[in-house]
Amino acid sequence: MLRIAIAEDEADCAQRLEGFIRRYAGEHGLEVDVAWFPDGMELAERYAPVWDILFLDIQMAGLDGMETARRVRRQDPDVTLVFITNLARYAIHGYEVDASDFILKPLGYDRFRARMDKLTARLARRQGAFVVLPLAEQKIRVPVEDILYAEVVDHDLSVITTKQNYLMRCTLQEMERMVEGQGFSRCNRCYLVNLRRVTGVERDAVRIGEHLLPISRPRKKQFLRELSDCLGAEL
């Protein structure tokens, strides 16, 4: 699923861009979720780091595209930013907010398709690098490499990362699906471990930095095999 937001105060331009996005998705067999924000302030105030691409009109009434981008970057350093503008000279300011590209108005599908080819190729190289965690109040995107492990806590799931811990309404099976193919394995029925974060195995426990998690007997053989495969060496 490709999640795309458009901040554009001209409704006809926003509708044209959304049509291009859906046309491109249909041509390439992509699933897309597209949202339109009629001004930069609405996007900035409601922003959550769940988007893959943001299309921002540079010249908008109220909060313009550049200031919107600055506010977004404070919350999300990884989202792909693309500016929409009438004048190419404005695009140079995109370097201030690490913009990936710009599209000149009036919008044409051939130019748009070429831009999207570059953007989707770049996103494909990053695919799986992030996971979106459904917290109680919001959704938040977390780099997979920052996750140490996930632990069942009553009917909730606690996700332990290098920066902070997150509690969410989610099963361990659902978390497994989120990180499938990213080097995670269960050491017992209550813990899902990022194998790349393992620092050692001690008898019937796996160490992840200062954390020591029990390895259950039924899962030990498979867990150690998957750990060995992930690290590329026998323990």
Image: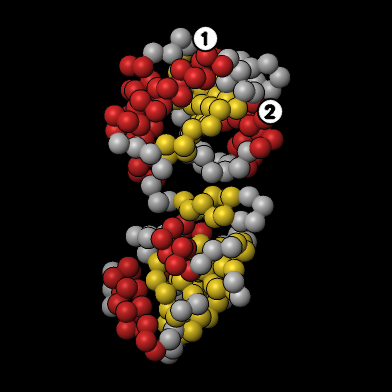
Question: How far apart are the two marked residues, 2 and 1, measured between alpha carbons?
Answer: 22 Å
Q: Where is the C terminus found, in terms of image quarters?
A: bottom left
- Residue at image x 44%, y 58%? 178
Q: Position of residue 211 (x, y in %)?
A: 55, 77
Q: Is residue 136 above or below residue 228?
A: above
Q: Are marks 2 and 1 in contact (CB under 8 Å)?
A: no
- Residue at image x 35%, y 73%? 227
**Res. 10 in view:** yes
- Residue at image x 44%, y 80%? 188
Q: Which secondary structure, mark 2?
A: helix
Frontmost residue, 81 versus 5: 5
Q: How was this image coloured?
A: secondary structure
Q: Is residue 142 above or below residue 11?
A: below
**Does residue 100 appear left or right of residue 155 in this picture?**
left
Frontmost residue, 228 versus 45: 45
- Judging by the rendered image, the residue that carries numbered circle 2 is 41
**Does residue 96 appear left or right of residue 202 in this picture?**
right
Frontmost residue, 214 versus 90: 214
Quarter of the image where one finds residue 199: bottom left
Query: Disc 2 or 1, which lies upstream in sequence?
Result: 2
Numbered marks: total: 2
The three-letter code of the residue at mark 2 reads Met
Q: Nearer the viewer, mark 2 or mark 1?
A: 2
The three-letter code of the residue at mark 1 reads Leu
Q: Position of residue 151 (x, y in %)?
A: 54, 72
**Does residue 87 appear left or right of residue 234 in this picture?**
right
Q: Position of residue 173 (x, y in %)?
A: 44, 67
- Judging by the rendered image, the residue that carries numbered circle 1 is 87
Determine crowd level at label 2: few under 14, some 14-19, many 20+ residues with C-alpha closer than 10 A: many
Q: Position of residue 183 (x, y in %)?
A: 37, 64
